[in-house]
């Protein structure tokens, strides 16, 4: 796989063309990743962290419970659609918020994956990839704020409860 050109996921120039360019670049990278076991494992991980189910369209084949390849292929289709819709919305949200409105600080990615309905699929796809799922999750968990290269808008740590009025 070739080394992709970095794509700004946050604080991108607020223009429809910049959004389209970012979506196209990420879609191309995901499409290239789909051709390798490593890429398919990481697409499944990204889908799991975004709660994308293994069967998400009436146009898709409903996969058997252990048909990891079809499950991931269905998620891949959803991820591509997600990327195409996300960047214009993201730019709008950043413009309204005056900056990046999302974060991954305090998110424990291994715990998040453990709660996912597709955690087993991710583990099974990592086995033939030669990658370390634990290693990838550790990388995400220890990334400095703002350096995680995927938008992770949920679940966020809950805000503190308001103090009861005296």
Image (tube, rainbow, N blue to C red):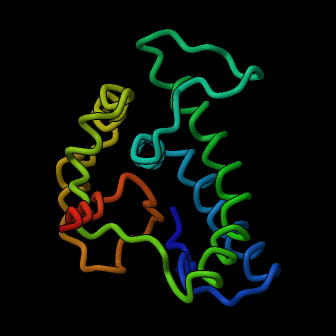
Placement of 39 over or under 19, stated as above or below: above
Using residue 70 as the reference point, say whether residue 19 is left or right of it: right
Residue 153 seen in this snapshot: yes
Which residue occupies 25% across, 59% down? 107
Residue 65 percent coordinates (x, y): 44, 11
Image quadrant in which you'd find residue 18: bottom right
Placement of 28 over or under 14, stated as above or below: above
In the rendered image, the quadrant that contains the C terminus is bottom left
Image quadrant in which you'd find residue 7: bottom right
Q: Residue furthest front?
A: 166
Which residue occupies 58% across, 55% down? 30
Which residue occupies 34% across, 33% down? 116
Return the residue nearer the eye: 137 or 52.
52
Label total for image: 0
Using residue 16 as the reference point, say whether residue 89 is left or right of it: left
Using residue 156 as the reference point, say whether residue 133 is left or right of it: left
Placement of 41 over or under 64, stated as above or below: below
Residue 139 seen in this snapshot: no
Which residue occupies 77% across, 22% down? 59
Residue 66 percent coordinates (x, y): 41, 13
Placement of 99 over or under 135, stated as above or below: below
Q: Residue furthest top?
A: 64
Q: Residue furthest right?
A: 17
Return the residue nearer the eye: 39 or 145.
145
């Amino acid at each position: 796989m070739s080394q992709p050109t970095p794509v700004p996921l946050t604080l991108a120039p607020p223009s429809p063309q910049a959004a389209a360019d970012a979506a196209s670049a990420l879609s191309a990278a995901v499409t290239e990743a789909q051709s390798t076991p490593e890429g398919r494992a990481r697409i499944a991980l990204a889908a799991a962290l975004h709660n994308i189910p293994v069967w998400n369209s009436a146009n898709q084949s409903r996969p058997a419970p252990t048909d990891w390849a079809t499950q991931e292929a269905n998620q891949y289709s959803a991820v591509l659609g997600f990327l195409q819709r996300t960047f214009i919305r993201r730019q709008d949200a950043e413009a309204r918020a005056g900056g990046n409105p999302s974060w991954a600080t305090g998110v424990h990615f291994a715990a998040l994956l453990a709660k996912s309905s597709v955690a087993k699929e991710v583990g099974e796809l990592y086995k033939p990839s030669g990658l370390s799922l634990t290693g990838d999750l550790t990388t995400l968990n220890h990334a400095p704020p703002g350096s995680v290269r995927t938008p992770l808008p949920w679940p966020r740590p809950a805000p503190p409860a308001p103090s009861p009025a005296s």
